[in-house]
Image: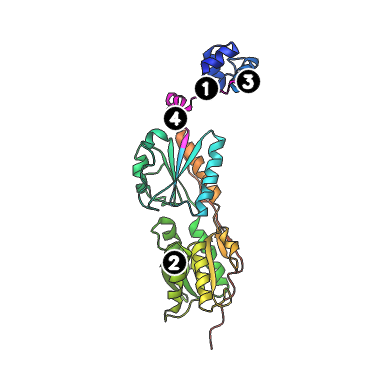
Amino acid sequence: MTRPTSRDVATAAGVSQATVSLVLGDKWPGRVSERTAALVRETATRLGYRPNLAARNLRLGSTRTALLVVPALTNEFFARVYTGAARVAAEHGFGVVLYPSPDGTGPARDPFASARAALDGVIASSMAAHALQAIGGDTLPLVMLDSDPRAGGAAAHVNLAMADGMRQVTQHLLGLGHRRFLHLASAVDSWTFDTRAEALTTLLGPGTELRTVRSPLTADGARTAMEAALAAPLGRPTAVVCDDDILAAGACKAARRLGLRVPEDLSVTGFDDLALATAVEPELTTVHLPAERVGEQGMTALLAVLEGTPWTAPDIPVTLVVRDSTAPAPAPAS
């Protein structure tokens, strides 16, 4: 069956093709009567007419499409970022294409034959601006999420208050009497994890001990790293501060395998507040990161940049959620 054209709609409705274009392009008010506009829309629906968006976008010089680049699709955090971005995009007639970088936080390859022609802008979460040159180069506006605000190459930044999140964790544990800390840090080299490490080091003053162990971002990797750290003859920590909930789940598993109780012998904290945080036992004390809000602000920032409006905003607040994986520090062994 031949696809109906705007000319077919005009003929069936008894109006000009220009009138059809005005009505279906939402530019009719003040130029076409409401009765005629209703007739055109009804005729288009009856014929099954669909506008040729590709041709329309070429005329407008806009595809109304944004690309969201994330390190991985397996992490719930990035799925929630996409949900927030897509919600705001839909409210403004935009679409969002989700694209995982094949190399995690490394350089992202151009996902299309020519991304510059297929996109209006790029939003990138937890990546470095230089890793996105193959996609946008200097021709597409770039909004960076959860990335170094001092780095160049981006038209706007949207960040979470990561350092404040670590402050909340540290104050909570210090208030419980903990003085011997282990930082189970992500082995991924990124601004967001560096910020957490710097904040923790700064916040722990005299009279405290801090040891850092790096781990892949997997529960098994965290378990292995944690077992080795707890077996080392360096004095057992009473609190383990993890860079995310997946690492915290691995830390809890390692503690159980070594006969340690969480939180009686060892307090464990996470970051992100994924669904995993309440699926494990004991439930994790963790920092809630409002990922959907990150996506919403990221898309809002891109829309502002596309309109030529400067965009700035304070860091998005984060909140410590206290659950059952933390408790007062155990008394020193006699």
Position of 114 relative to 52 (above/below): below
Q: Which residues are magenta?
A: 46-65
Circle nearer the viewer, 3 or 4: 3
Disc 3 to disc 4, how far (Cα)? Answer: 27 Å
Q: Nearer the viewer, residue 8 or 130?
A: 8
Disc 4 to disc 1, how far (Cα)? Answer: 30 Å
The answer to whether marks 3 and 1 mark residues whose Cβ atoms lie closer than 8 Å is no
Disc 2 to disc 4, how far (Cα)? Answer: 45 Å
Q: Residue furthest front?
A: 1
Q: Which residue is mark 2?
A: 221
Disc number placed over residue 64 in the picture, else none? none
Bin the neighbour count of mark 3 within 10 Å (Cα to Cα): few under 14, some 14-19, many 20 and up.
Answer: some
Percent position of residue 64, x then y? 48, 33
Disc 3 to disc 1, how far (Cα)? Answer: 20 Å
Lateral position of residue 149 relative to residue 256, left or right? left
Disc 4, SS: loop
Indicate which disc, 2 or 1, sits on the residue closer to the N terminus.
1
Indicate which disc, 3 or 2, sits on the residue closer to the N terminus.
3
Q: Which residue is mark 4?
A: 62
Residue 58 inside the magenta-drawn segment: yes
Residue 126 inside the magenta-drawn segment: no
Position of 166 relative to 210 (above/below): above
